[in-house]
Image: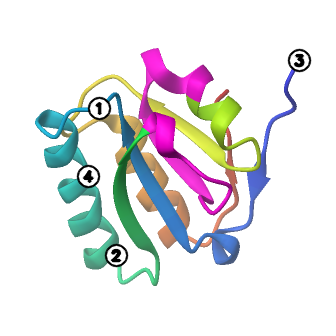
C-alpha cells in the first residue's frame, strides 16, 4: 500500500514526537528525545505535537505504534518510527544512533 520512506541522515532537520492529544508521558518522551539529539550533537529540531496536527514539514515522526498509521496519513513523506515505551524505547535510541552515525533511516511502516 505505502512504500517505505527513506531519508539520508543529513536530510533530517525536524523530528516530531507525536501523541494522541495529551501532554503527560508523551511530553516526557519528547523531552528525552531532545536531550538525546543534543547529546549526539545533531543539528535537528525536535518538537512535540498531537498526531492530528502533523504537517509535511516533518522529516521524521516518532509516534506510539497505535497511532503510526494515522501519522503516515498526515505526513506521507516522513519516516515513521513507531515506539511502544514512552521513555527509553529501543526504537528511539536506535533512531538517534543511526542519525549520529550518518546512516540513512527507513520508515518502519
- Viewer-nearest of discs 2 and 4: 4
- First in sequence: mark 4 or mark 3? 3
> Residue visible at 49% across and 35% down?
52
Of helix, strand and loop, which one carries label 2? Answer: loop
- Viewer-nearest of discs 1 and 4: 1
The magenta span reads 51-70
- First in sequence: mark 2 or mark 4? 4
Q: Which residue is mark 4?
A: 30
> Residue visible at 28% across and 57% down?
33
Of helix, strand and loop, which one carries label 1? Answer: loop
Q: Which residue is mark 2?
A: 40
Left or right placement of residue 31 versus residue 10 in this view = left
Of helix, strand and loop, which one carries label 4? Answer: helix
- First in sequence: mark 1 or mark 4? 1
- Viewer-nearest of discs 2 and 1: 1
Q: Residue 2, which numbered label? A: none
Q: Report if residue 102 lies within the magenta region.
A: no
Distance (Cα) linking label 1 and label 3: 27 Å
Distance (Cα) linking label 2 and label 4: 15 Å
Distance (Cα) linking label 3 and label 2: 34 Å
Distance (Cα) linking label 4 and label 3: 29 Å
Q: Which residue is mark 3?
A: 1
Q: Which residue is mark 1?
A: 21
Amino acid at each position: 500500500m505505502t512504500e517505505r520512506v527513506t531519508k539520508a541522515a543529513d536530510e533530517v532537520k525536524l523530528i516530531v514526537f507525536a501523541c494522541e492529544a495529551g501532554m503527560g508521558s508523551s511530553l516526557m518522551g519528547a523531552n528525552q528525545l531532545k536531550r538525546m539529539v543534543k547529546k549526539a550533537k545533531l543539528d535537528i529540531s525536535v518538537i512535540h505535537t498531537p498526531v492530528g496536527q502533523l504537517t509535511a514539514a516533518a522529516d521524521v515522526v516518532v509516534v506510539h505504534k497505535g497511532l503510526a498509521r494515522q501519522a503516515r496519513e498526515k505526513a506521507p513523506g516522513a519516516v515513521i518510527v513507531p515506539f511502544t515505551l514512552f521513555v527509553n524505547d529501543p526504537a528511539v535510541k536506535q533512531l538517534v544512533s543511526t542519525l549520529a552515525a550518518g546512516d540513512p533511516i527507513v520508515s518502519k511502516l
